[in-house]
Image (spheres, rainbow, N blue to C red):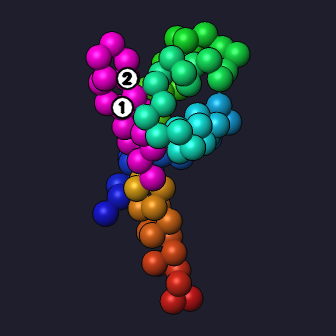
Amino acid sequence: MITNDDMDSIFQALAHVTRRTMLDHVRNTPGLTVGELALKFDVSRIAVMNHLAVLEKANLIVSEKDGRSRRLYLNAMPIQDIYDRWTDSYTAH
């Protein structure tokens, strides 16, 4: 079962438009590198890395080392867990 701390991390990660856009890019292009993702935004690479850290903390992004690069993948399970918690509890009502 998903904890309140887990939900807080997920909602915090999803609260920022840039992070939601990053998730869209990673969903649409599984295996996208951090460098390729950074090119899609008009912010510093450090800012991109900070956003990715929040997404990884929430377990929404999984990164895999590939030589000198990191490849990014969407993990939709935390969002599914929240969906299941709320819909399962309230479906009967």
Magenta region: which residues?
A: 58-76
> Which residue occupies the foreground of this view, 62 or 6?
62
Quarter location, residue 68: top left
Q: Is residue 9 visible?
A: no
- Secondary structure under badge 2? strand
In the picture shown, does residue 57 fall above or below 41?
A: below
In the picture shown, does residue 7 fall above or below 17?
A: below
Number of marks = 2
In the visual, does 39 lie left or right of 3? right
Percent position of residue 73, x then y: 42, 39
Distance CA(mark 1)–CA(mark 2): 6 Å
Point 31% across, 23% down: residue: 66
Quarter location, residue 41: top right
In the visual, does 62 lie left or right of 21? left
Answer few, some or many: residues within 10 Å of disc 1's Cα (few below 14, many 20 plus, some between 14 and 19).
Answer: some
First-in-chain label (1 vs 2): 1
> Which residue occupies the foreground of this view, 34 or 92?
34
- Magenta part mainly helix, strand or loop? strand
In the visual, does 44 lie left or right of 71? right
In the rendered structure, which amino acid carries the disc numbered 1? Ser
Image quarter in which the N terminus is found: bottom left
Residues at badges 1 and 2 in contact (C-beta under 8 Å)? yes
- Secondary structure under badge 1? strand
Q: Residue furthest bottom?
A: 92
Q: Would you say residue 73 sits in the magenta stretch?
A: yes
Q: Which residue is mark 1?
A: 63
> Which residue occupies the foreground of this view, 44 or 16?
44
Point 29% across, 17% down: residue: 67
In the rendered structure, which amino acid carries the disc numbered 2? Arg
Kindly identify which numbered label has been placed on residue 70.
2
Percent position of residue 37, x then y: 56, 24
